[in-house]
Image (cartoon, helix red, strand yellow):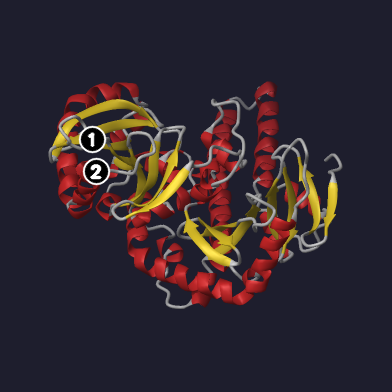
Amino acid sequence: MAKKRTLTDPVLGQLYWCGCDDRWEAAVSLDYFRKSGEAIDRLEEEKKAIAKKNAEKSAAQRRKKLEQLAETQPDNPVLQAFRQGYMNELLNELQSEEAPQENENDTRDMAEIIHDADSGALFRKGRFPLAISADPKRRNSPGTSHHAAWKSLMDAGTALWDQLMDTLLEEYVHNREWRRHWWLRTFGPDQSARRFPEITTKAELLKLIRPSSVHMKEARTEKEAADIVIIFDATYCDFGVRVRHGKIALIDGICNLLRPEADQHLPYAPKNDEQSEIFKMCHSFKMEAPVCSEQHASFGTLRFYTGNKRWKGTARLEAFREVRNIAQTRALYRDDPDEVHPTVMVYPWNVTRGDFQLLVSTKGRTPPTEAQSHAFTALLKKQKQYLAAILDAIYCNYGKRFRKCREKLPKESCDDLAPALSNAEGLRELLELHTVEVMAENKEGDVDLMFAFACSWEEPGTGLILYWHNDKVAKIQYGWKSYIPPYYY
């Protein structure tokens, strides 16, 4: 690896410049979490053991077939040579899949470990990776805002982490059965007891979670402290925590904290609109900031973005969390388990709580009208009735489309993604709410609602839009595109 540009910071220590991600990287200590994540390690060891067992089984089956073939032509030198060569390849394949042994005397320097994203090696040294966003042209070093943020975090110390653990424990207990339900429906009983144990103390919870990375953003001005975002791995649901001025500001889904929109004051946007949104989120590209925000009596916190000319917020619709598009994940997991990240895709932090993206359309930047507030309040109060009517309408529409949809789907997954249904209840594992929009008032003063759903029987990244008018479904149309799959909330 080429030698990295380094910098010794008086507060953060040794920093290494990562040009591919336009950021400074370091390794930092979070002593509170030194003994965390014991259950995560056990699950990882179990995963490696299963992978090894499957590889050995596959190799044995291939070896048996080759032996049988070789026995039919014992005097064929070409076949016998091929047999020996193939056997050697199988042996090498098995050896390459052996789980690497823990190396307490890792000779790599810290820059290499961070560059390799080897958080396990860092954790064994009692450290965690830190990423600090910077201007790629100036490569500006961390300033007073970063130093103030880190000092605030360190000064808060154990009291801050105890407060966080109290909150996480309450959330875990409240949503444990719900997450466990969807795990069982998607993956079956395997690992469910180890991922969702019944616990009552912070010490028990500490075994289920572990920080995986720390991210620091530039503050709006040098007089303000920068935000710190800490990403946690967990047996039950990965999540992130934003710390501001030494206090817990937000606990949320990872991409809600890392994606550019989550930063309220970033000055420039990427030029290439075709770049993957997930790529943008993971690499902290800087996007549009909201023009203004307000606290609304009916809608809660709303922020106005000029890019889509709407107010954005969050709708708490717990009834809609009963609808999860797990069919795609279930089919993907069956075909290739390594492609599935269960703690993100099955029960993301927001959806588990019943939080969905809310959009409110108004004229310019004017606040939502009274009619819009009434329409949204009616949805909140009667969300179960709304969901029942929505499922009935989509079921009728699905019956007309599913045969044609099956023709476009891979044959091996047709029954998973577009099964024949006898009633609307079967849609609950094929659909997933992404966005609710409160439309602008029409000339008659009526307010319609728009629901955007991801659905298993359409192409990945697309779905359907359902319009709600005068207490009933008015129209369903397809072709809506989601750049952010719902499970990346």
Disc 2 residue crowd, few under 14, some 14–19, many 20+, Cα 10 Å: many
Q: Nearer the N terminus, badge 1 or badge 2?
A: 2
**Residue on which disc 1 sits:** 441
Q: At label 2, which amino acid type do we have?
A: Gln
Q: Is residue 464 left or right of residue 225?
A: left
The front one of 235 and 288 is 288
Q: Is residue 422 above or below residue 77?
A: below
Secondary structure state at the residue bearing disc 2: helix
The front one of 89 and 365 is 365
Q: Residue at x 36, y 63 (%)?
A: 175
Secondary structure state at the residue bearing disc 1: loop
Q: At label 1, which amino acid type do we have?
A: Glu
Q: Is residue 378 left or right of residue 432?
A: left
Task: Report the disc number at residue 372.
Answer: 2
Tell me the quarter of the picture where residue 173 sits: bottom left
The front one of 115 and 4 is 4
The percent position of residue 171, horizontal first and vertical second, equals: 40, 66
Q: Residue at x 63, y 27 (%)?
A: 74
The percent position of residue 32, horizontal first and vertical second, equals: 63, 72
The front one of 449 and 196 is 449
